[in-house]
């Protein structure tokens, strides 16, 4: 029969092991950009432990956000995820800063494949892209359009509801506040956004689901994990472009 002393020691070892497991699970990076032959093995949103190694083939390029920074790995070669990460800098801070879109007129930046236009701040609703958007403040929502060469009117309607509102972008204005008195976005709801028709094209319609974040994420890897877990892949792609640019 086990002694009381032995049992106490066993319980202590079990608790220590549990603490180590939790600590190890917390130290996990998130893939935010992936291309090449191994992209299927390391898709965007995949979590990889900081202490793990990744073996890449020729043509592979993987960007991972880890605790406090980012790391770009380019094959062929074997890499330890958490070693040699580049600390995030001003551009990343501007992209992820809460409330930045409400303080100043926000333009657009170019990044990603073939100089595609990216949102300058994560916490904007892209009126030209379907998908899920994570937001912190549903009372002060800013809408953003990637093309701002002339004035345009967009219509926003909640799925399954009769009410809709029009949002008028003037001249070269890239972003516009959504009046909560006219339409307040709700957590978990999906909205249909219809853009203007032109002589060459029909009106473009996209569906956007809203997810309200209730926790502030201080570390890049934690923010990336939250976006991935909630399916906010457009915002995760913006993180990936910025993280790669800063680490290159």
Image (tube, helix red, strand yellow):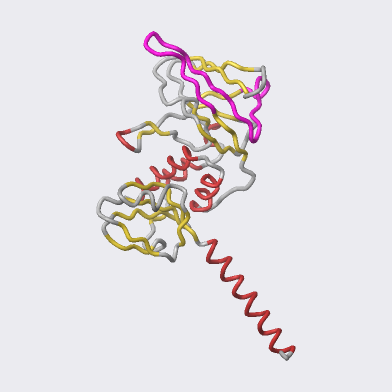
Return the x and y of residue 139 as percentages of the image width and height: 65, 31
Q: Residue at x 46, y 40 (%)?
A: 95
Q: Quadrant for residue 83, please give it.
A: bottom left
Q: Residue furthest right?
A: 4
From the image, which quarter does the N terminus lie in? bottom right
The correct choice, above or below, for 54 with respect to 5 in the image is above
Return the x and y of residue 65 as percentages of the image width and height: 44, 53
Taking the image as shown, residue 52 lies to the left or right of residue 154, namely left
The correct choice, above or below, for 209 with respect to 245 in the image is above
Q: Residue at x 59, y 24 (%)?
A: 178
Q: Residue at x 56, y 66 (%)?
A: 23
Return the x and y of residue 238 as percentages of the image width and height: 43, 40
The correct choice, above or below, for 163 with respect to 97 in the image is above
Is 187 magenta? The answer is yes
The correct choice, above or below, for 160 with respect to 98 in the image is above
Numbered disc total: 0
Taking the image as shown, residue 63 lies to the left or right of residue 217, namely left
Query: Magenta: predominant secondary structure element?
Result: loop
Q: Give the range drawn in magenta.
A: 179-207
Foreground of the two, 100 or 96: 96
Is 50 magenta? The answer is no
Return the x and y of residue 61 as percentages of the image width and height: 32, 50
Q: Residue furthest front?
A: 1
Taking the image as shown, residue 182 lies to the left or right of residue 208, namely right
Q: Residue at x 43, y 55 (%)?
A: 69
């Amino acid at each position: 029969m086990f002694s009381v002393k032995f049992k106490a020691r066993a319980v202590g070892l079990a608790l220590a092991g549990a603490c180590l497991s939790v600590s190890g699970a917390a130290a996990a990076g998130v893939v935010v950009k992936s291309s090449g032959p191994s992209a299927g093995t390391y898709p965007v949103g995949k979590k990889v432990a900081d202490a793990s190694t990744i073996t890449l083939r020729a043509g592979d390029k993987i960007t991972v956000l880890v605790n406090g920074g980012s790391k770009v790995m380019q094959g062929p070669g074997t890499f330890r995820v958490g070693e040699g990460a580049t600390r995030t800098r001003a551009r990343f801070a501007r992209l992820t800063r809460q409330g930045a879109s409400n303080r100043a007129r926000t333009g657009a930046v170019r990044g990603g494949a073939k100089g595609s236009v990216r949102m300058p701040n994560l916490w904007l609703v892209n009126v030209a892209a379907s998908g899920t958007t994570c937001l912190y403040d549903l009372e002060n929502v800013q809408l953003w359009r990637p093309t701002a060469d002339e004035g345009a009117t967009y219509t926003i309607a909640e799925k399954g509801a009769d009410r809709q509102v029009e949002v008028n972008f003037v001249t070269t204005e890239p972003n516009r506040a959504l009046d909560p008195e006219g339409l307040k976005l709700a957590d978990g709801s999906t909205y249909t956004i219809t853009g203007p028709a032109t002589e060459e094209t029909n009106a473009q319609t996209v569906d956007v689901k809203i997810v309200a974040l209730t926790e502030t994420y201080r570390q890049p890897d934690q923010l990336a994990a939250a976006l991935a877990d909630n399916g906010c892949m457009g915002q995760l792609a913006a993180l990936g472009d910025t993280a790669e640019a800063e680490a290159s």
